[in-house]
Amino acid sequence: MDKIKFYSLWACAILLGGCQKPNYLERNVKNQLMDFYATIDGKGQDRLFLSTISNDTVYLHVDYYYPIDSDNEVDLSRLMLRASVPADAQVTPGLNGFTDLTAPKKITVTAGNGDAKDYVVIAEKKGNTDISGVKITFKDSEQKVNEVEGILNGNTVTFYVVPGMDLSQASLSYVINKHSSGSIASGGQVNLANGAEVPLTISGAGNIKRQLKLVVKEPVKLEKGVGISRRLFLKKAADLGFTANSETSCFVSGDYLVIVSRTSPSVFKVYNRFTGAYSHNLTNPFPAGRLIFQGVSDEKGRFMLGTYTPNGQSFVLYKYKDVFDTSPVKLLDLPYSKPTAVAAGDGNIGRKLNWVGDMDGNGQLLASVATSRYLLRWTVENGQIKSTAADVLEYKDGAASLGFLPEYLPLGVGANAELIASTNAELAYVSGSTWGRLAAFPAITGTAMNGGIAFQRFNNADILAQVKLFGSNEIGQMYVYDISDRARIGTTLSSPTYNQLRVYESELFTGGINGNATSDICMGTSENGQRLQVYMLTTFGYLVAQEFTIYADSN
């Protein structure tokens, strides 16, 4: 360093109040792609086409048509690419504007320290061969029509049918997109008698084919817990018209699923929960400017929506009879002051609510207090709030601050009912009398946050569903636990009984930036009680519906 520069720096240090060591910026050495997807003109940041990254190759999965049932063929020469890379890294050539992927394209990710890694991007344009709603219809010995829905597992569709049925002239029905066709037409006849395995080929645009196998098996009914599961549907944010970082919660009401969007004004979108088809928007009775994050429901389809409420505002709560109720009842309009023990932050409520009980009878409403380990509890009797003065409860073994989204879910209606707590740091089983931790669920490596939770009694078992967030909260995963035997909760991942606790985990769903770290999960059952539906909402991009049955594979 020459003398002029040295003395200049010395003089600046004196003027700033004394000598300090200079801060040196350490250049990042990471040069890997963290995320890669594509969109098209007019769709902005929508994650239309996702990718699989394998070593130095990026396989971009492009739909032949978008939307699937439209006649708009995707032009590979006009894709808009998006990538996430570590801080201080850059992608060359730049991904601005349109990119031609009619042929493989090389890109380079260069770390801040200059280390470079080359990738080849290959676009795989394929027609859609998804199939849903596969059913067979046949007559029994009394000539009564029976309809059995198939369970799709991989490329095998299994129909669980009780013995003695004539399946030689069964009618097959299913749903595919308009650009695809089946080797057996929907509504056509199929012979599934005597253990026959019948092939079904779905042909899609671009000469893609999917080979399926139709089989019939005698079901084995489980006395307890969940059995065979299937993907009911998967919807991307773009398919559902999501607003970036706005969809914060979901709940079931009858045959419908409601998704809450915390936009201003807040919007409550109603969907058919078996197909994912949009139905309508709920009436919004809340005062102008009030944001809604969370809704909760009971098993009879009634539900409540409450305001996001910082310290010093009023907590407003409405109850709806069902999704068609245009005159919901106001249960609370209560000035809110955070508990005195909450020293840091505004201690807001309304980001996470939970309910247990009958909303027209008796139950409890719980509201987590943000940036603390406290929660508020209102008791409901005969459908009315017993007292506007809420019980202030403290999770004794929780950290002093559990972030903005701690969630507490009672496992029963009683005042001392045990609870499940989902916080940044843990998923825990908590005493309702001492409010201490009884056991912690096994920690999953890489978990950034424990997200939304839901509880349902199903087939004589206690079923808990949870969202886990990974990375920078941009990756979501559905976990389903059978907590009937509470002693299993404290087991380890390596325990031979762990799979009896964790009965299902989904694949990872990678989305966009989720700065709010929000997510939710909810459950519902079919009218006959034989199927359980679990819905995972990831703010960053997906609605995943998984269905579980009371039947196990007879093999």
Image (tube, rainbow, N blue to C red):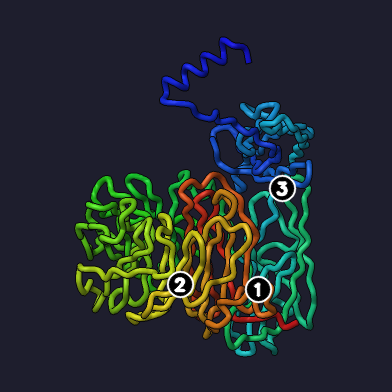
Residue 52 marker: 3
Residue 188 placement (x, y as % from top left)? 69, 67
Placement of 30 over or under 442, stated as above or below: above
Secondary structure of the residue carrying tag 1 is strand
Is 331 on the left-hand or right-hand side of 59?
A: left
Marks 1 and 3 close (CB-CB < 8 Å)? no
Question: Cα distance, mark 1 to mark 2?
Answer: 41 Å
Tag nearer the camera, 3 or 2: 2
Secondary structure of the residue carrying tag 2 is strand
Look at label 1 and name its amino acid. Ile
The residue lying toward the viewer, choosing from 18 and 326, is 18
Q: Which residue is mark 1?
A: 136
Residue 295 placement (x, y as % from top left)? 37, 61
Secondary structure of the residue carrying tag 3 is strand
Residue 420 marker: 2
- Asked if residue 259 can be seen in this view, the reply is no
Is 98 on the left-hand or right-hand side of 215?
A: left
Look at label 2 and name its amino acid. Ile
Tag nearer the camera, 1 or 3: 3
- For residue 93, what is the image quadrant? top right
Question: Cα distance, mark 1 to mark 3?
Answer: 35 Å
Placement of 182 over or under 461, stated as above or below: above
The structure residue drawn at horizontal position 64% and vertical position 41%, both measured from the top left corner, is 37
Placement of 75 over or under 250, stated as above or below: above
Q: Residues within 10 Å of mark 3 (few under 14, many from 20)?
A: few
